[in-house]
Amino acid sequence: MYCKRILDNGIRLVTERIPSLKSVTIGIWVDVGSRDESLAEAGYSHFIEHMFFKGTTTRSATDISREIDSLGGEMNAFTTRETTTFYVKVLDQHLPKALDLLSDLFLRSRLGKKEIEKEKQVILEEIRMVQDDPEDLVQELHAKLVMGRHPLSRSILGRESTVAHINRQDLVRYIAMYYRPEKVVIAVAGNFDQPKLEATIARTFGKYRHHHRAVPSKRWPAELCGGVTMKQKPLEQVHLCVGLPGVAAGHKDRYAIYALNSALGGSVSSRLFQEIREKRGLAYSIYSFLSGYSDGGTVTVYVGTQAREVERVLDLVFRELRKLAKQGLDRDELKRTKDQMKGGLMLSLESSHSRMNKLAKDELIAGSHTTLEEMIVEIDAVTEQQVLQVAQQSFLAKGIALTGLGPLSSRQMSNLSARFS
């Protein structure tokens, strides 16, 4: 059963009680991510996510690790371009201890100077690790091409130069600016006692205040850029990304573009997987994915292949894009895609963790909750005509972006730039 409460200080509490589960997951979501940072602050959101685990006024970092392990639970955090999240998943009987631990991290982090200096090195290694993973690196290069100078183009991890110079004062100021109660959503899903949970949340988080004046939103929609970026690197494969416009996370056409993505490259039965990997053996890894933000989105095709096959693979990718833009999905393929979407959706929501994620995202995107039944109705309502219109808007758009990384010759790079620019 879904329930929403707003604390006196503006923190939103969204819950879904599922008595059939033996677990419960609590997430604290802050409506701030890498796109909210200035260029000089690049990486602050992610750095703060790390620092909250490095000790509080009552617990050391070791205490935190031992305590969550003693509960047999999972505690972690993640930063996206629009949110920062801290969560814990435990057996329902351990909810009070888990909530005490999570609230301690969020409300009483020490942000110790020595820990900050140590964590700088950890994150700098994380940034360097991306340079050694060509799949990650080509997608990072691709984001820079597609988003241009927009903050969405930047790495969530930040830049080495900004991370190396972070100090405690910077982090305290950033938290004061963005970790305001009205920007916080607490999402809880699983088996719990609703009145007890609400009383505990109100007691624990009800006094959370920030006296820094509200900061106007810095967000604005990105203008997607086309073009070609090719980077030579001595690798075994060439890694490619093709970028196209998508839709925002809460857009009315989101289920139509989900269906298109699934049919294009979102599964092992998709057109790209079957045509390029299964039929022709030109790639091991090929897929497409959606990136949906509060005010826009993209579709990206990724593939890794041999340098000599690059143009052939790209021809096949663009052929499938043109076919979808010209013909859409016929009745049978759309039905199969819808069935796949509904099955994947239902399976993905079987855990308290995934339910918690959905609760928070619904609240942050729409300010309301969409039930599984309502989502299935919306999927079923997608028509062939709607899919065709979305395919034409996305896949026939001018200014397609192409990024390549790997053992490309200068001649190849020149030919690809001339052909796809």
Image: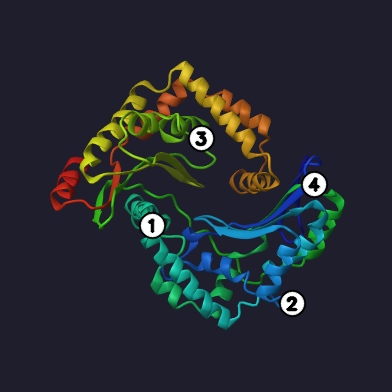
Q: Which residue is mark 3?
A: 254
Q: Which residue is mark 1?
A: 133
In the rendered structure, find residue 191 and report the number of the disc placed on it.
Answer: 4
Q: Is residue 206 visible?
A: no
Check disc 2: other Cα within 10 Å, few if <14, some if 14-19, many if 20+. few
Q: Nearer the viewer, mark 2 or mark 1?
A: 1
SS of the residue at dot 1?
Answer: loop
Residue type for callout 2: Thr
| Alpha carbons under labels 4 and 1: distance apart | 40 Å
SS of the residue at dot 4?
Answer: loop
Q: Position of residue 228 (x, y in %)?
A: 25, 48
- Give the camera-side residue of 113 and 98: 98
Q: Which residue is mark 2?
A: 58
Dividing the picture into quarters, in which one does residue 301 lie? top left
- 44 relative position to 357: left or right: left
Residues under numbered marks 1 and 3 in contact, where contact means CB atoms less than 8 Å apart: no
Q: Is residue 377 visible?
A: yes
The C terminus lies in quadrant = top left
The N terminus lies in quadrant = top right
Q: Earlier in the sequence, mark 4 or mark 1?
A: 1
| Alpha carbons under labels 2 and 4: distance apart | 28 Å
